Image: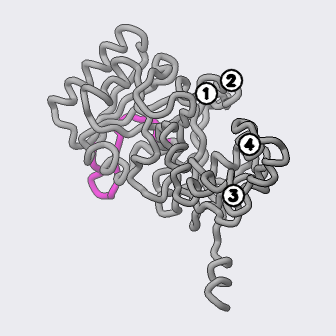
């Protein structure tokens, strides 16, 4: 078996993780890890705003960075002749001139694709808010919550995407991240449905990241930045990290209590602690540990 055969024989199946769902199936539970910062993350509680990050700023250079199929770029003027015709029309070219110059018209577009300038422009218009299904992962607390000095917020999100389809970012409606051994192949101009395109561009990561059990809220309308979310309908609890300084915990507690007195009387605050014998984060009194076994792997669905 030569190298190419070995490569093609690799298991490149996708998995994702299914969230815990309410008894009636109407809502699902997600968690957002955050460092403690009064000017940004704390405002997820005090002001109901959430940060969406441009994919170009992610810590993993392979994330949102598929393998662009070179053959599809070479044949772009054939596969997407409609776009080349539009370019010709904008330049005022006749049908005969279009046929004569279509390769020339396609050349700068193909060059932007090969240089990945097209990819960068697209990603600059996207904002992503990453959520997890696991509030007690040691690595997640270390990487995304300032070495356990930050906090996690728990969100109770409507399970139906259809009901929130016009306000996906405001309602924090997430899509699952798929974990694979190989990067997805994106073919320019080929007939793929929108769901497949979004999965390849924005929702596929290396299998090494599967411990994150990530789901993503994609903001294509406004992009990256800090925006309001439906806090009073979604925020369920707040979990302080093991190493959160007492001074920061008092500020976090004050923010939670203010919100309990105003619009969220049932909002709860927990404080994580170390397990005495295991490598585990304990969230005293939180139902997570009773429900954790319900988070399962699943095969890639049709989106």
Which is nearer the eye, 73 or 174?
Answer: 73
In the figure, 294 relative to 155: above or below?
below
| Residue 51 point in image, percent of width and height | 40, 32
Query: How has the structure been colored for display?
Result: one colour
If you read the primary sequence from the N terminus, does the residue marked by circle 3 or circle 1 appear first?
Answer: 1
Q: Is residue 17 above or below residue 229?
A: below
Tag 3 residue: 187
Secondary structure of residue under mark 2: loop
Question: In the displayed structure, does residue 140 sit left or right of residue 178?
Answer: left
Q: Secondary structure at mark 3?
A: loop
The boundaries of the magenta stretch are 273-290
Residue ID for mark 1:
158
Pick whichever, 295 or 152, lies toward us.
Answer: 152
Tag 4 or tag 1, which sits nearer the N-term? 4
Q: Is residue 264 magenta?
A: no
Whether the residues at callouts 1 and 2 have beta carbons within 8 Å, the answer is yes
* Residue identifier under label 2: 163
Residue at 65% in and 53% down: 298
């Amino acid at each position: 078996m030569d190298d190419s055969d070995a490569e093609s024989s690799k298991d490149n199946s996708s998995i994702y993780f299914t969230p815990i769902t309410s008894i009636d199936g109407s809502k699902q539970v997600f968690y957002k890890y955050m460092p403690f910062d009064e000017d940004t993350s704390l405002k997820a509680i005090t002001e109901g705003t959430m940060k969406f990050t441009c994919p170009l700023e992610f810590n993993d250079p392979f994330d949102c960075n598929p393998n662009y199929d070179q053959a599809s770029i070479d044949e772009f003027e054939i596969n997407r002749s409609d776009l080349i015709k539009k370019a010709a029309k904008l330049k005022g070219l006749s049908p005969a001139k279009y046929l004569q110059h279509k390769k020339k018209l396609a050349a700068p577009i193909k060059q932007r694709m090969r240089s990945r300038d097209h990819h960068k422009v697209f990603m600059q218009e996207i904002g992503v808010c990453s959520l997890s299904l696991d509030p007690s992962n040691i690595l997640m607390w270390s990487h995304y919550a300032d070495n356990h000095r930050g906090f996690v917020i728990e969100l109770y999100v409507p399970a139906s995407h259809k009901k929130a389809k016009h306000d996906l970012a405001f309602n924090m409606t997430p899509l699952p991240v798929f974990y694979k051994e190989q990067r997805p192949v994106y073919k320019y101009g080929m007939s793929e449905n929108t769901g497949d395109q979004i999965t390849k561009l924005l929702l596929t990561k290396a299998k090494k990241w599967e411990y994150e059990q990530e789901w993503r809220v994609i903001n294509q309308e406004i992009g990256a930045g800090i925006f309001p979310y439906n806090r009073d309908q979604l925020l369920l609890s707040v979990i302080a990290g093991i190493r959160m300084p007492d001074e920061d915990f008092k500020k976090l507690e004050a923010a939670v209590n203010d919100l309990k007195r105003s619009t969220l009387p049932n909002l709860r605050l927990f404080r994580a602690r170390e397990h005495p014998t295991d490598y585990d984060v304990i969230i005293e009194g939180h139902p997570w540990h009773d429900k954790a076994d319900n988070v399962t792997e699943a095969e890639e669905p049709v989106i």
